[in-house]
Amino acid sequence: MLAITSTGAINTTSGVTVNGATANYQYNNSTTAFNKTLTLTQGTLSGTGTISASGGVTAGTNAIIAPGNSPGSLTFTSGVTFNTGSTYLWYDTEGNSLTGTVGTNFSSIINSGSTVAINGGTLALSFTGSDFTTGDWVSIHTWDIISGGSVTGAFSTITVNGGANTLPTGTFSDAVNVGNDLILTWTPSLVVVPEP
């Protein structure tokens, strides 16, 4: 893993290439955006910094974008493209009380003035501390998982990892809302409707 800390930098004019099944470029610089070319061939791009890569970032087969440090938010200013075979690895540590904060309790991509194009790929959901049956899991819930700028398309596949917990009885779906954010929606198999 190549980790850039809160004030770290890479002194290069040729940019960075992430190319390896276990490679992870973790960019956590909170003061300076990464503004070189970033080629994500295979491996993972993660962290909490800002990516202003020349030409944007394209994730293809075996390439993973995992905002934060499980979880957290990663900001892009020059565009992101998810192609077939790519993965958006999304983390949630809210447990059964789905009242957490974006960037702290669940991951997000912040799209600052650019376009996120989703041309297939997988939205991989990773939950910690959730039993998917009690608390807020009995009702419909939404998360804003890509916000700002413009978002087009949807992921071809959604997978769920609950660790040792029982997997949910219900469905997850993703769709772009009227504000051009990508919204993840949980719909339990049995929706509890309060009495009037």
Image: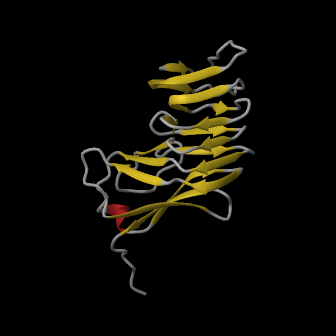
Along the horizontal axis of the image, is 175 left or right of 9?
A: left
Of residues 129 and 47, the one nearer the viewer is 47
Along the horizontal axis of the image, is 25 left or right of 129?
A: right
Along the horizontal axis of the image, is 164 left or right of 48?
A: left
- Against 160, residue 11 (above or below) is above
- Against 27, residue 108 (above or below) is below
* Residue 82 appearing in the image: yes
Which residue is depicted at the point 47% across and 49% down?
123
- Against 187, residue 91 (above or below) is above
Of residues 169 and 80, the one nearer the viewer is 80
Of residues 80 and 6, the one nearer the viewer is 80
Q: How is the image coloured?
A: secondary structure
Along the horizontal axis of the image, is 22 left or right of 168?
A: right
Which residue is depicted at the point 29% across and 62% down?
133
Give the residue at the far bottom of this rendering.
196
Percent across and percent down for residue 119 are: 59, 50
Hey, which quadrant is residue 168 in on the image? bottom left
